[in-house]
Amino acid sequence: MSVVAMTRVRYDDYVKDEVIELGQQAVKIFEQQPGFVSLQRYRSRGRNEIVTLIEWESECAYTNCNESHDWLLLIPQWCALQEEGDVEIDTRLLDPLPQF
């Protein structure tokens, strides 16, 4: 049964370019991982916010991606932005998508 990880990133104006670049790097990593199914990104027009929905074949595939070498190399850059207060990130697993 597939799972969807939802990530909501809120950011200050002056780190917008860095957030977009890190997001593009993250997408490349996700797409190369076993168990990746699909990805959708939504950028808010009214505020500095990006919502990303990533579907994985299983929760195990999601976990393995979070433990992958490439992802672990990218995490410190995201953490630095959060520690400086420039970015807020909320990630959660959603209930499985209904099958139609």
Image (cartoon, rainbow, N blue to C red):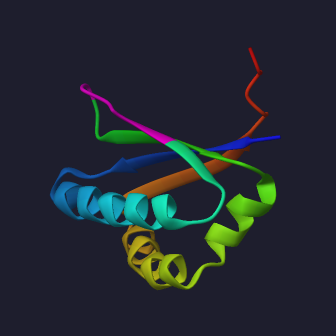
Q: Is residue 42 magenta?
A: yes
* Relative to 31, residue 47 above or below: above
Quadrant where the N terminus sits is: top right
Write the start and end of the magenta stretch as one range: 39-46
Q: Residue at x 48, y 81 (%)?
A: 70
Q: Residue at x 78, y 51 (%)?
A: 58
Q: Residue at x 35, y 40 (%)?
A: 49
Q: Quadrant of residue 15?
A: bottom left
**Residue 95 or 19: which is nearer the viewer?**
95
Quadrant where the C terminus sits is: top right
The answer to whether residue 86 of the structure is visible from this angle is no
* Relative to 94, residue 7 above or below: below
Answer left or right for 37 relative to 75.
right
Residue placed furthest toward the right: 1
Task: Where is residue 91? Give x, y as percent.
Answer: 61, 51
Q: Quadrant of residue 47?
A: top left
**Residue 94 or 82: which is nearer the viewer?**
94
Task: Where is residue 65? Give x, y as percent.
Answer: 63, 68
